[in-house]
Image: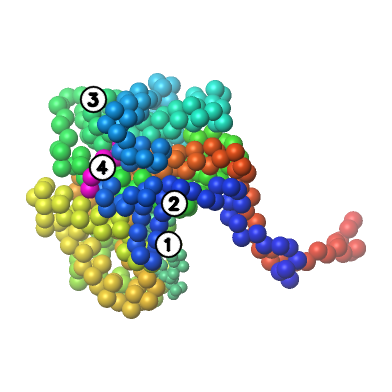
Amino acid sequence: QSGLFTYDPGFLSTASNNSSITFIDGDEGILLYRGYPIEQLALHCDFIDVCYLLLQGELPMPEQKSEFDHAIKNHSMLHEQLVRFYSGFRRDAHPMAVMVGVVGALSAFYHDALNISDPVHREQSAFRLIAKLPTITAMAYKYNIGQPFVYPQNHLSYAENFLHMMFSVPTEKYEANPVIVRALDRILILHADHEQNASTSTVRLAGSSGANPFACVSAGISCLWGPAHGGANEACLRMLEEIGDVSRIDEFIQRAKNKEDNYRLMGFGHRVYKNMDPRAKLMRETCHEVLNELGLHNDRLFKLALQLEKIALEDDYFISRKLYPNVDFYSGIVQRALGIPTSMFTAIFAMARTVGWVAQWSEMVSDPDYKIGRPRQLYTGPVMRDIPISFSQ
Ligand code: SDX
């Protein structure tokens, strides 16, 4: 019977259960990074501002920002031996499989000299991960399509540099559309951190054993990949493509309500938000802006998504369960409008979330009282018993 063992609900059971980085009020649909509302950050800041804020706790003054930006850019290249690592993957490997491998392999280059109790080492690891993730992510795409890798250009902004590494080719001049750059920068801001979601908890739990941050972020990427988490943006776009037309929305809503094969509307629902995810609202606005500015205002999937959201939010099944669109519902449509292939959506989520992962990891390991996470379980197996005589030889 249960009760034989004490049940410790404390998930991480370390000092790191507290954090001053991100606040979410799920009932009110509030999201703050270091106290600043996500709506204001998305409107007035760029991703480098937000990276500085998440790591340092304050928005950067101009000279702090340029120094920080320079430090990040200094680490944007990949060791050439790691570049060769890609050739070990199948050409059609999912980008997330490549990122799990390559980010984890960064440990082979930095682990030995790393002392995580040294704040300078922690900061350098954070810079390396934030700087290298766009290069690693873009290379995963280039490897998939058989095009040559494009090296980072440090005169470009973070978002522009990533687009350049993704889409430029040696034979043509490449200029990123400013509308696309701004939209991608906002997508990165909206995905940067989100309190103790599954992948951040994975990074913290891995880091609580003293594992190096590169291995911890690789573990976070693995967890984010799941369709119940970061993989939902890719799954949501595939769902919209499968629905195809507004006339079929009711059929899919019914499938979800009947739980056919545990079918769920991708991009709907959240463990914490029982109101609209503020990021979903901002993503929907970004969608509107980008599609209008790119002359795609009649985008079929966007109209389908708007209608699906409207119908679902009028349906008692969703209302009674407080199921609202989450960050993944519109992010796929925006990224598709930016010309980003569906297979890269979750990889870009991982690239953006890296700053949140390293900020949370750094906050934990810099706490002198943190201990290794050791979740407990409520034991429901047999009570203690002896092996029957008949069994023993
Ligand atoms: C992210 O944690 C984070 O912060 C994550 C994230 C971040 O930034 O890191 O915000 C990013 O992961 C967003 C979530 C992306 N995932 C999806 O969109 C996948 C589809 N959604 C789900 O599977 C689900 O909503 C979860 C996992 C996100 C949340 O599940 P909950 O809140 O634990 O809800 P539940 O599984 O307990 O379900 C409650 C009820 C059930 O029905 P009943 O048993 O009451 O009859 O709601 C139903 C579920 O069947 N339900 C859904 C549904 N989600 C829940 N029904 C249809 N469609 C859905 N999407």
Question: Which badge, 2 or 1, is on the more N-terminal residue?
Answer: 2
Q: How far apart are marks 1 and 4 (CA)?
A: 26 Å
Q: How crowded is mark 1: few (under 14 residues within 10 Å), some or many (20 or more)?
A: few
Rendering coords of residue 106 (x, y %): 47, 29
Q: How far apart are marks 3 and 4 (CA)?
A: 19 Å
Give the SS element for disc 4.
Answer: loop
Residue, far bottom: 316
Secondary structure mostly taken by the magenta-highlighted segment of the chain: helix
Query: Is ligand 1 closer than 8 angstroms to the Cβ of mark 2?
Result: yes
Question: Which badge, 3 or 1, is on the more N-terminal residue?
Answer: 3
Which mark is nearer the camera, 1 or 4?
4
Question: In this rendering, does residue 121 appear at all?
Answer: yes
Q: Do the residues labelled 2 and 1 touch (CB within 8 Å)?
A: yes
Give the SS element for disc 2.
Answer: loop
Question: Which residue is under mark 4?
Answer: 45
Task: Write the start and end of the magenta stretch as one range.
Answer: 43-48
Q: Which amino acid does label 1 sit on?
A: Val
Question: Which badge, 3 or 4, is on the more N-terminal residue?
Answer: 4
Question: Which residue is under mark 2?
Answer: 195
Query: Is ligand 1 closer than 8 angstroms to the Cβ of mark 4?
Result: no
Nearest the eye: 87 or 313: 313
Q: What residue type is labelled 3?
A: His
Q: How is the image coloured?
A: rainbow
Q: Which amino acid does label 4 sit on?
A: Cys
Question: Which residue is under mark 1?
Answer: 272
Question: Which residue is under mark 3?
Answer: 155
Q: What residue type is labelled 2?
A: Glu
Nearest the eye: 141 or 347: 347
Q: How crowded is mark 2: few (under 14 residues within 10 Å), some or many (20 or more)?
A: many
